[in-house]
Amino acid sequence: MSKYILFILSVVALACGGPKGIIISDADKATFEKNYKAFEKYHIGGIVSGDIDLFLDLYADSLKWSGPNVYDGSYQTKDDLAVAAKGYLEMFEDFSFQSGGVNPVNDGGYWGGNLYADNGEINTEPNGIRIYGVWNATHSESGAPVKLKFYAIQQFNEAGKVVLLNEWFDPSSMESQIQAYLENN
């Protein structure tokens, strides 16, 4: 019985022990939701439908893009992003995106603000979102199914356009999945 009492007291203490004074406004919540819904509508929607114009509508003309193969701190442009997206659309079909994958119960794929940071600053910024998920597609030439873990950070401006995009995924994993498919089929 004392174990249960200790457990309940621990839960209560932990629930009360978080940072105090953090206020998240309804306007910030609405902005965050608008931003991740825009990612779903334009980025995911454009890729899934094969509509490059829809995909690019999310991104400001001044976009700074750091793609998965860029490691030197430089940024590419919206035109560079368009070329890369067109390449994927030419090589793959039947795209889908499953958000989440951050934990075993898959309970969230879009995150904004932070509760902890190594610089000690806490923020509730709704215009910077982190996106986690898995892309699924079929390699057009071979019919090989591929999965790609995906992580991105997008910074939105006040007009609702993405001005900074950082993406992390391993494009070479698609090659190895295609090769394994060909060897086994």
Image (cartoon, rainbow, N blue to C red):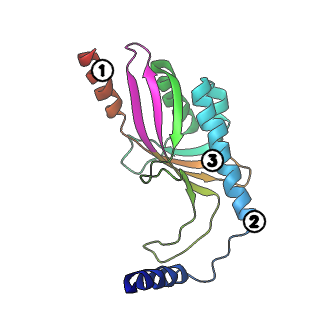
Query: For the residue carrying disc 2, how many other residues have a C-alpha within 10 Å: few (<14), some (14-19), or many (20+)?
Result: few
Q: Quadrant of residue 140?
A: top left
Could you tell me how far apart the alpha carbons at marks 2 and 1 are, in whole angstroms? 48 Å
Residue picked out by circle 3: 162
In what element is the residue under mark 2? helix
User: Residue 21: horizontal and vertical position, in percent?
Assistant: 63, 82
Which residue corresponds to mark 2? 26
State which mark lies toward you, 1 or 3. Answer: 1
In the image, is residue 28 part of the stretch drawn in magenta?
no
Q: Nearer the viewer, mark 2 or mark 3?
A: 2
Number of numbered tags placed on the structure image: 3
Residue 158 visible within the image: yes
Residue 58 vertical placement versus 159 (above, below): above
The numbered dot on residue 181 is 1
Range covered by the magenta-colored residues: 133-150
Q: Earlier in the sequence, mark 2 or mark 1?
A: 2
Q: Amino acid at mark 1?
A: Tyr
Question: Residue 40, position in %: x, y?
Answer: 63, 40
Q: Amino acid at mark 2?
A: Asp
Q: Residues within 10 Å of mark 3 (few under 14, many from 20)?
A: many
Look at 52% across and 27% down and name the residue there.
95
* Vertical comparison of 29 with 79: above or below: below
Asked if residue 145 is among those painted magenta in the image, a careful observer would answer: yes
